[in-house]
Each structure stands twice: as structure tokens, then as C-alpha cells.
Image (cartoon, grey):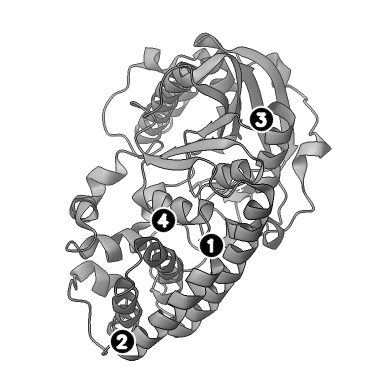
Amino acid sequence: MPDPSFANLPPNDDWSFTDVTRIETNYLTHGYHRYPAKFIPNIVQKLINDYTKPGNLIVDPFGGCGTTLVEAKLSGRKSIGIDINPIAKLITDIKTKPIDPKKLKKYNAVFLESYNNTPDTVPSFKTERLDYWFEKETQIKLNKIYVAIKTIKDPYIRKFYLVAFSHILKNCSKWLMKSIKPQVDKEKNAPEPYNIFKSHLKFMIKRNTEFYDLLNKNGFLNLSCKMKIANTAKKVPIKSGTVDFVITSPPYVTSYEYADLHQLSLLWFGSDEKYFKSWGKLVKDFTGFKKQFIGTSFSKEVDLESLNSQTAKKIVLSLEEKDKGDALNVAGYYSDINKSFIELFRILKKGAKSCVIIGNTSLKGIEILNAEVVLEQLENLGFKKLEIIKREIGTKIITSWRNQITGRFSGSSQKNSKRVYQYEYLLIVQK
């Protein structure tokens, strides 16, 4: 049965931050790169202040674009992030380790000279999928920027420029800007690549300086902060019993496939196998890569006992009556999430706390009680429930309306729309 603590729980205004705008959450390095379903840094900041102390080790097993790691470093806490996505690691590495502004300024002049001397050519790794997503003229203009970036000798500064390049790919592609699904916009007129690259690079350089100066002032510039590639549902590269606090927001079931949202960056970089050697295989077997993500479609039967939750079983069985495929997807998701919590339990110190941030939704008319399922799984694994915090999600940050039939994001005035991401829960538990 669902935990009765969730029934009629009022939202906590101290954790809601409903007046915070998207722009306000992109301070310092948080705005370097677009990323789906980012949780706002205000929540992470408050969790760190309330539940940790300087010098603690904080881990985010679903690290994403590094929001937890940035805030941990700002607060004088060591941190480790885990994610299966190499794009996430690329972004986080740059967001969490600012570059000496004088050094960055020097290389900016070098880049500009290289760019001006780079001829207009199509990518040497041109593929059918690149042709599908980018007009030929756009490919040539993007390639000029990309070739110039690769001439930067300092590997870390080169990565800084690659993150700026990765950020503009969606704007410059045929991808429908408001869509979270791979969808071509036949009416789209791509902007001039160099203009938006130059603008975003200027933004990143400014924010890098602010971040560098703040960390340097507080003595946190060289504080340990690492992002590692791993499948959280299998094994994470962290020693048992070494972590002081876990902050994480797992991917939501029924949301969307995270790998799809980064395929343009992965496609461009991974197609250049001579440079991104380890990424080429991910592009060649993109379907196989996607299957490694938690929340991705499943095609095989899942043992309901592996869900470790009676509530999860009930949800899956209800979905089976409506759609076998959806039932498989949800069952696979809950099974993988439970495996990730086993790892979470292993790496935490005895008595250490964890916060899992997750919300509920619906699918085919069935309530998908993610928060209730997750708490049940955590308690069944040996965690002690300390607190359930319900927060309202501000509409200034995320579009919370979805089509009740298709499950896709929609507008409040569209037919069959329902606000499903109005609230989310912070589940505070202790080992």
C-alpha cells in the first residue's frame, strides 16, 4: 500500500522556490549548456546547508550536468557525480573546474586567429545522420568553428570551447526547438552558427571568471570534484561506506529518453572517430547505448519481485490491462531504480543521510506513484525514513502540462492536457 504519509501532505514553501525564474537558476556556470529536467540549484544549496558540513563527501549517482557538484564546490564540500552519458561528463568537467581567466583570454585570441584562417569545408566525417539533422551550408559553418577549436593546444580549454559548441548544435539543427523528442521542424531557419557561438562563448567566459574568483576567494578552487562514467544500476566506482550525503534526482519514468536529447552532440563528436575515439561506437550502436539508460524502453519481461515494492507491482499490473509495452517500460524502470538504490546504500557511511528528489505522474489514466514506490524501495533496502518534503514546482522553471493520452509535454490550453508535474517530493532517509 502507498505510504499514508503522502496523503494530503501540504507543499512546503521553504522548499518550493516558485518565484525563482529559469534565468535566476543559471548563475555562475549553471547556464553553460542546456540539459533536460535539471533540478534547480536552490534546492541543492539548501540541502547542503541543512544536512552537511564543510569537508563532507557528497555524491550524486544521477549526476546529469553537475548541478549538485557545482553547489558542493561552492559550499566547500568534496563531491563525486556518476552518469552514463559522456556528454554529461564533458559538461560537468567544465562547469566544476574554472579556468584562470587570464589564460582563457589568451587562448580566445588564438582561437579567433585559427578560425579566420580555417577554410570552409564539409566535415571530414560527414554521415547520413548529419545530413538528416543539419543543412549542408550549416554543416560547413559549424565545421569551421569545430576545426578551429581542435587547434587549441590546451586540452582543458579545448573542452571549454567544445561545450560551447555542443550547446549551439540544437539551435543550428533542424530539430524542433520546443520538442523533447527527435522531431524535424520543416519551417525552421537555423541562425548563423558563428554569431550564436560567439555570444554563448562570451557568456561562458564571463561566468567562468565569476566562478573562478569566488572559489579562489573562499579557498575552494582545488577542492576535489569528480564526474565519473558508470551505470548506476550496476556498479559505481566508489568505495563502500565512504559517502557522507547523497543528493540525487533520478530520471522520471514516462518522461522521455535522455540519450535522445543529446544525440546531436554525440552524433557530431562521435562521428569524428579519429578525435573522439571512444564515442564512435556509441554512435554506431546508438540504440544499444540508449538501452543502458534508466527509464528507456524495455522489450523483455521483468520479474515483479525485482521491483521491491508492492505499490510498483500494483501499478505495473494496472498498466498491463491497458498497454503491455507501457507496463514493461515502467516495470523495467522500477527494477533498475531499485538496483541503483542498492548501490546508494552500499556507498553511504552508517548513519549517513540521503535525499532522493522525485515526483509523481500518470500514464494511460493510471497514477504513477513514483515517490511512494521509491520510499517503499528505500525502506525495504534498510533505509530509515526521516522526512517527506512536498514542494511545488514553479511554472517559471518547467512546463508541467502533459497530454493525458500521449504522455508528451503540452500547453495548459491544449486538449487532453493535465498538469502532472505540479509537485515533487524530497525523500530524506538514513542508512
Checking the image for residue 32, the label placed there is 1
Residue position for label 2:
137
Q: CA distance from mark 1 to mark 2?
A: 26 Å
Instruction: Tell me which corner region of the image, top left, top right, bottom left or bottom right, holds residue 126.
Output: bottom left
Q: Earlier in the sequence, mark 1 or mark 3?
A: 1
Q: Nearer the viewer, mark 1 or mark 3?
A: 1
Q: CA distance from mark 1 to mark 3?
A: 26 Å
- Residue density around tag 2, few if under 14, some if 14–19, many if 20 or more, within 10 Å: few
Q: CA distance from mark 1 to mark 4?
A: 16 Å
- Residue density around tag 4, few if under 14, some if 14–19, many if 20 or more, within 10 Å: some
Count the numbered circles shown. 4
The one of 422 and 73 positioned closer to us in this rendering: 73
Checking the image for residue 261, the label placed there is 4
Q: CA distance from mark 4 to mark 3?
A: 26 Å
Q: Earlier in the sequence, mark 1 or mark 4?
A: 1
In percent of width and height, residue 293 lies at: 36, 39
For mark 2, give the secondary structure. helix
Relative horizontal placement of residue 69, taking residue 157 as reference (left or right):
right
Residue position for label 3:
426
Residue at coordinates 49% horizontally, 21% vertically from top-left? 242
For mark 4, give the secondary structure. helix
Q: CA distance from mark 2 to mark 3?
A: 47 Å
